[in-house]
Amino acid sequence: AQTVTQSQPEMSVQEAETVTLSCTYDTSENNYYLFWYKQPPSRQMILVIRQEAYKQQNATENRFSVNFQKAAKSFSLKISDSQLGDTAMYFCAFINLQGAQKLVFGQGTRLTINP
Amino acid sequence: DSGVTQTPKHLITATGQRVTLRCSPRSGDLSVYWYQQSLDQGLQFLIQYYNGEERAKGNILERFSAQQFPDLHSELNLSSLELGDSALYFCASSLSSPNTEAFFGQGTRLTVV
């Protein structure tokens, strides 16, 4: 079974700092996607960034980038120049492109950006 | 706004009762997913439908059932409710299966008293 582990329940940084959220996953498959979702206090689940496992290049979306280490099964999220609006729960998620194809989430990291 | 609509936003009901949660996917999306988010278990995948057919099943209780209708909206039925069923229930939709880009609704907060 696929599992996703986020080892940091909570993190806190000052505004404008860079922060990295960790995520590891476990799968025996080779064809899958990885995601980071953000859940602000509004409860809305918002897709932040996506990485296809077959791509070696790390995905970037403005201030958000990932460090995808396929062999290590690691998928960390880096937020540069953090802003108060980045305060949210962040979930790492995995989907296998074969079989059940269900989106599996980690337990989440609560990130607080302090002014 | 993700384009996915869930109703109702809040629901309070008593133990033993039955409720129906509704989800309207984004226009054109064929896949609908249901997730349960509780404090102690994170986001749990319940079930997936694709163009009216069940595609994948997760840790969905036998007291729970779902369906996707010809107009692609979906309903999640929860029966014989227990206190532990209190949670936030999310619906997500995507154009195809698998959900390489899933868009989530705002969720239904269910409180069982």
Image (cartoon, coloured by chain):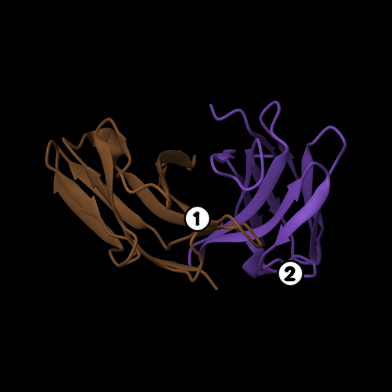
Chain colours: A brown, B purple
Identify the element where label 1 is drawn: strand
Q: Decide if residue B113 is on the left or right side of residue B69.
A: left
Q: Is residue B74 above or below residue B66?
A: above
Residue B67 appears in the picture as rendered: no
The amino acid sitting under disc 2 is Leu
Identify the element where label 2 is drawn: loop
The residue where tag 1 is placed is A32
Q: Nearer the viewer, residue A58 or B78?
A: A58
Q: Nearer the viewer, residue B66 or B86?
A: B66
Q: Decide if residue B107 is on the left or right side of residue A30.
A: right
Which residue sits at x=83%, y=44%?
Answer: B52
Q: Residues within 10 Å of mark 2 (few under 14, many from 20)?
A: few
Find residue A32 and report its horizontal and vertical position in percent: 50, 55
Tag 1 subunit? A
Find residue B104 and report its horizontal and vertical position in percent: 57, 40
The residue where tag 2 is placed is B61
Find residue A94 and report its horizontal and vertical position in percent: 48, 57
Find residue B34 and report its horizontal and vertical position in percent: 66, 51
Residue B76 appears in the picture as rendered: yes
Q: Residues within 10 Å of mark 1 (few under 14, many from 20)?
A: some
Q: Nearer the viewer, residue A27 or A48?
A: A27
Please identify, in this view, whether the residue under mark 2 or under mark 1 is nearer the observer.
1
Q: How many marks?
A: 2
The amino acid sitting under disc 1 is Tyr
Q: Nearer the viewer, residue A10 or A23?
A: A23
- The outermost residue toward the right is B70
* Mark 2 and mark 1: Cα distance apart in space: 27 Å
Which residue sits at x=49%, y=39%?
Answer: A44
Q: Decide if residue A24 is on the left or right side of residue B11.
A: left
Tag 2 subunit? B
